[in-house]
Amino acid sequence: MNKILINIDSDFKKKISKKSMKNCIISSIECGALNNFDESVSLSITSNEKLKDLSGNFLGKNEATDVLAFPFNTNWEEGKLISKNFDNYQNFDHLGDIFISFPKIKDQAKTFKTGIQLELNIILAHGVLHLLGYDHKNKKMRQKMFTKTIEIIKHLKLDHIKAKLSLESR
């Protein structure tokens, strides 16, 4: 893997381990990518306001969400690199960018009784899977993404049973 770039807003730095986030990204790629992988990923953990701005600018939705994933390389489909042909607008050295709202993570950790660390890993794994071409547009795709997320949490030696119960209730 080329590089993992992690930016955590100063308000949240003391509550989040960059090493833990890097391990989650690496595990998500190991579990989710079926091809050799040599692309960089960037992660920003930020505020609800930043996610709301991004959501409004790129999705036309005027609301904050827990995670947004912006793939730079659209040649991934459910963990497989389907084409090595790139147009001039795709950066084949960079998989994409993930933005996570830490306040949303804190709220969801309470709501789903996961704790902040587990919730952050669940949501980050979800974001990486989106970069690898996974989606949840229909029931079959949702199930694949659900199964991969649990596999990643298990790989990280986190409470995959609590994660599974949490994801089933969403």
Image (cartoon, grey):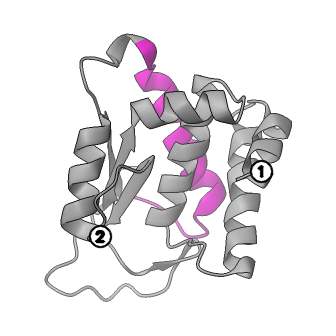
Query: Where in the figure is residue 59, as x and y percent of width and height?
Result: 29, 70
The residue segment tinted magenta is: 15-38
Front residue of 34 and 105: 105
| Amino acid type for the residue under numbered disc 2 | Leu
Left or right? Give the position of 133 relative to 56: right
The image quarter in which residue 16 lies: top left
Left or right? Give the position of 80 relative to 71: right
Q: Which mark identifies residue 169?
A: 1
Q: Secondary structure at mark 1?
A: loop
Query: Where in the figure is residue 73, as x and y percent of width and height?
Result: 33, 73
Marks 2 and 1, Cα distance to the nearest angstrom?
25 Å
Query: Where in the figure is residue 80, as x and y percent of width and height?
Result: 56, 76
| Amino acid type for the residue under numbered disc 1 | Ser
Inspect this view and state whether residue 62 appears: yes
Crowdedness of circle 1 by 10 Å Cα count: few (<14), some, many (20+)? few
**Residue at point 23%, 68% (across, down):** 58
The residue beneath circle 2 is: 59
